[in-house]
Image (tube, helix red, strand yellow):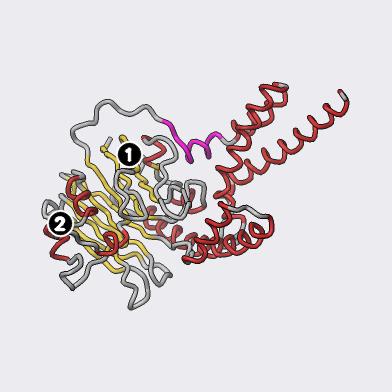
Amino acid sequence: MKRIGKMVGHLIWIVNAICTGLMILVAFSPMFNPTVHPIRSTFGLAFPVFLVINIAFVIFWLIVYWKFALLSIAGLLICYLPLRTYMPFNIPAQKIPEDRIKLLSYNVMGFNHLVKKDGKNDILEYISQSNADIVCLQEYLTSKNTKYLTDKDVFTALRSYPYRQIQQIGEGKQSGNKVACFSRYPILSARVIPQESKYNGSVLYQILVEEDTITVINNHLESNKLTIEDKVLYEDMIKSPEADKVKEGMSHLVRKLADASSIRAVQAQKVAKEIEAARTPYLIVCGDFNDSPISYTHKTLTKNLKDAFVESGNGLGISYNQNKFYFRIDHIFISPNLKSYRCTVDRSIKESDHYPIWCYITRR
């Protein structure tokens, strides 16, 4: 019996070793360029799964035979930087410098599909009360029908922002997808960054903040193109993980995710070139990137920038809130000569399929 128990223990350790290796693989999957390795580039989405498995193995072995726990502990140490990127923990700053600006980035989902109740819109109310100095919006949409939300409604609610820029993005003439910037500081210029996409893109602003010009790039990168049917399929897999259903469903979803990842890779590279070519010393890149912290997009854009959430946020910071796709896909990146404070994914408002992300930023 003792020999059988020893064999079972070693078999469990082998499974542990495989899971540790897979955790390391997915943690460093951003190294794979999606245009060359589209499927591998999606591995990062599985990082939380293997992270939980390896933490469970550590707890198991500490109870059963502590030496075997060293394998998973070593794996977690190897993955320290990806783990901190995915789920940072910081001591909140007690005092925010007075010379800071507050930046808010929010995918408003057409202001919750243009809903207007008693002449008001909850998302607009949230923005107007946020006390943000610069507001970058994605999926900006208004109507000419006064029954729904109009430009006049938006401009009236956000009248404390004297400067604004609203641009359509995407190559399609009927794209309808817009991004917007509302600012308390003068917007000197706004330029659409050409992207190969029918509905998505980026806009670069030059904003004069006191005596300094700051480059701000507002992004809505390629979505994962998951239809309602795809999302239902995903939820069914979560609720009822039958082997055949999971195998067929995962194959379908991974192909779609890989296709979108390849398109985003090219878009991220274009934004990265704009970052490198920027003539101003201060840069902020924000928006809905449709990619998690463990992704090629994130790795590409943080080559010369810092992730504000990693620097001053806490926890998972899940910013997409529907269909059980619980990931942080909205980000704020800042240049090394800027410092962020209290970067927050605000879960207090649920009228959009995204939560807003904001932070205080100071110039060093």
Q: Residues within 10 Å of mark 1 (few under 14, many from 20)?
A: few
Residue assigned mark 2:
163
- Identified at 14% across, 60% down, the residue is 119
Is residue 84 in the magenta section?
yes
Foreground: 262 or 110?
110
Residue assigned mark 1:
337
Which is nearer the N-term, disc 1 or disc 2?
Answer: 2
Q: Which of marks 1 and 2 is in front?
A: 2
Foreground: 159 or 192?
159
Residue 85's x, y, as percent? Answer: 47, 40
Tag on residue 125? Answer: none
- Identified at 79% across, 35% down, the residue is 11
Local secondary structure at mark 2: strand
Foreground: 101 or 64?
64
Q: Which amino acid does label 2 sit on?
A: Tyr
Q: Magenta segment range?
A: 80-89
Q: Which amino acid does label 1 sit on?
A: Asn
Image quarter of residue 341: top left
Residue 329's x, y, as percent? Answer: 42, 51
CA gap, disc 1 and disc 2: 25 Å
